[in-house]
Each structure stands twice: as C-alpha cells, then as structure tokens.
Image (spheres, rainbow, N blue to C red):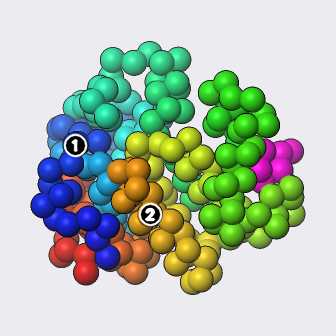
C-alpha cells in the first residue's frame, strides 16, 4: 500500500542520496568489496525495502547511510547535508536531529525503563526529562506500550523491547528512519500496528524509511523493493 500517489513521491524532495557508494574491507593481503559503486535515492515520505541474502552487505549499507561507518568511496547526503563534511561531534548531533535507528537487537539500556529509553534521544538533545518523557509516552502509546512504560528491558519480551526501540527511533520526529529487521520479533498483530504507524508518519511528516528485511510481507508493503546483490541495488517488482 503506497502512502502517496507515484507522481507526488517523484516530486518530493530527495531526503537520502547515495552516489557511487563503495565499502571495501582489507583481509590480510586481500580486499573484500561489500558495496560496489552503489547509487540510491529516497524521497521524503517514501518507504524503501532492501532485501538480499545473508552476508550481502545490507547492515553495512545501513551503517553507511546512518553515518556509523565511513565509505571507502562515494558519498551519502541526507536532507541536503553531505555526511563526509561532518566531524564525529557534528555527525552525532546530525544523527540525533535527522535520523532514527531501529536495530535488530534493540540496544536498549538495561538500567532504564521503557519510557526512559524512548526519551533518551530527546534528553541527549537537551530537552528536560519531563518534556522528553511526555513525548516518549505519546509514541509508546502508539506502539501499544503504555502499560509497560515503567518496566525495564529485562522485564519485557523480545517483541516489547522491539516496540520500545521503534518508539525511541521515532520520538525525535526524524527525517529518515533506518530499520534493520524491525518486525522480526513481533507477532502479526503488533507488526501490523507498526506498519500502520509507518504509513501515518510517511504521509503526515514526510519521513523517509529505509528498511532491511527478510520478511517478504513487510517488503511488499513498502513503496519500492530493492535487492542488494554483488554490491549493487537492483529494483524489484513494485509493491502492491
């Protein structure tokens, strides 16, 4: 299900632009090319799924898109800002302002409650704890986690922890959300709730999504499906 007509998506501003992106790792005397002159554009409000076999470089690509790793060659530009021009401090501030991350393994802080984890990006930004947690509670409600808001990660199921991680990614109203298997630990009903929330955000706030997944149903729900193969992205059949 597309959130906006094709012609509208084509006219929307480019939120993410990758040009000739390469990542090469040195393994002793040999070099391993994971990404090879890869190009990708994602427009505001667009949702793009990236599929591919294990070891094809999907997580490497997400790390480059989010500025968690630097490319061997090529460029990543988000909201008109080239990441290559930012030092580590500026890059951290940029991520906090523009990018939301949902990792496959949550990365929640064990000593903090669900609402504290979800509010953390806003607190890092400088908001008061009270205001940050008020906003976090709004997002936790949308992912069905209000009753568990004061529980710590160790008291939550895998699916509940994933919902908190999704709330944390969305709490700052980012321009771009990067997701690594976001529904992998969710039951069918909760996964459908998350998909509906993504639809709303893409439509209401023009947030762009890049989603790495093995879930065929999740991929088919997005506006475009790209397959990562031999270091390059190949367009798949349009989502229905």
Q: Is residue 118 visible?
A: no
Left or right for 230, reference 81: left
Real-space CA distance between mark 1 and mark 2, rounded to the nearest whole angstrom: 18 Å
Left or right for 81, reference 93: left
Q: Residue at x 83, y 45 (%)?
A: 112
Reading the chain from its start, which is encountered first: label 1 or label 2? 1
Q: Residue at x 44, y 16 (%)?
A: 87
Q: Is residue 203 visible?
A: yes
Q: Dot 1: within a 10 Å radius of its alpha carbon, few (fewer than 14), some, or many (20 or more) residues?
A: some
Q: Residue at x 47, y 43 (%)?
A: 174
> Which type of secondary structure does the marked residue at label 1 adopt?
loop
**Image quadrant in which the N terminus is located:** bottom left
The answer to whether 109 is drawn above or below residue 8 in the figure is above
Task: Tell me the tag on residue 200.
Answer: 2
The foreground one among 192 and 154 is 192
Residue 119 figure quarter: top right
Q: Residue at x 33, y 22 (%)?
A: 84
The foreground one among 18 and 100 is 100
Q: Which residues are magenta?
A: 109-117
- Mark 1 = which residue? 13
Instruction: Please tell me how many numbered marks the rendered image carries.
Output: 2
Residue 81 figure quarter: top left
Task: Tell me the tag on residue 134.
Answer: none
Horizontal and vertical percent position of residue 237: 18, 75
Q: Dot 2: within a 10 Å radius of its alpha carbon, few (fewer than 14), some, or many (20 or more) residues?
A: some
The foreground one among 200 and 55 is 200
Horizontal and vertical percent position of residue 95: 49, 33
The answer to whether 194 is drawn above or below residue 71 in the figure is below
Horizontal and vertical percent position of residue 35: 27, 46
User: Is residue 112 a member of the stretch shown in magenta?
Assistant: yes
> Which type of secondary structure does the marked residue at label 2 adopt?
helix
């Amino acid at each position: 299900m597309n959130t906006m007509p094709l012609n509208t998506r084509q006219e929307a501003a480019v939120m993410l632009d990758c040009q000739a992106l390469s990542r090469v790792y040195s393994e002793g005397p040999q070099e391993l090319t994971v990404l090879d002159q890869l190009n990708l554009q994602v427009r505001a409000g667009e949702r793009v799924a990236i599929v591919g076999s294990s070891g094809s470089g999907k997580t490497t690509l997400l790390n480059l898109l989010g500025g968690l790793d630097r490319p061997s060659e090529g460029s990543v530009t988000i909201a008109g800002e080239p990441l290559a021009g930012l030092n580590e401090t500026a890059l951290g501030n940029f991520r906090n302002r523009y990018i939301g991350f949902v990792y496959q393994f949550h990365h929640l802080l064990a000593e903090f409650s669900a609402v504290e984890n979800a509010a953390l990006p806003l607190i890092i930004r400088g908001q008061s704890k009270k205001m940050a947690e008020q906003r976090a509670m709004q997002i936790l409600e949308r992912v069905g986690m209000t009753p568990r808001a004061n529980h710590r990660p160790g008291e939550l199921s895998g699916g509940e922890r994933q919902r908190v991680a999704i709330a944390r990614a969305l709490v700052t109203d980012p321009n771009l959300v990067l997701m690594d298997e976001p529904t992998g630990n969710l039951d069918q009903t909760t996964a459908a709730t998350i998909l509906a929330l993504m639809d709303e955000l893409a439509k209401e706030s023009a947030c762009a999504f890049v989603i790495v997944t093995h879930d065929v149903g999740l991929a088919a729900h997005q506006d475009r499906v790209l397959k990562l193969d031999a270091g390059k992205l190949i367009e798949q059949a349009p989502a229905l």
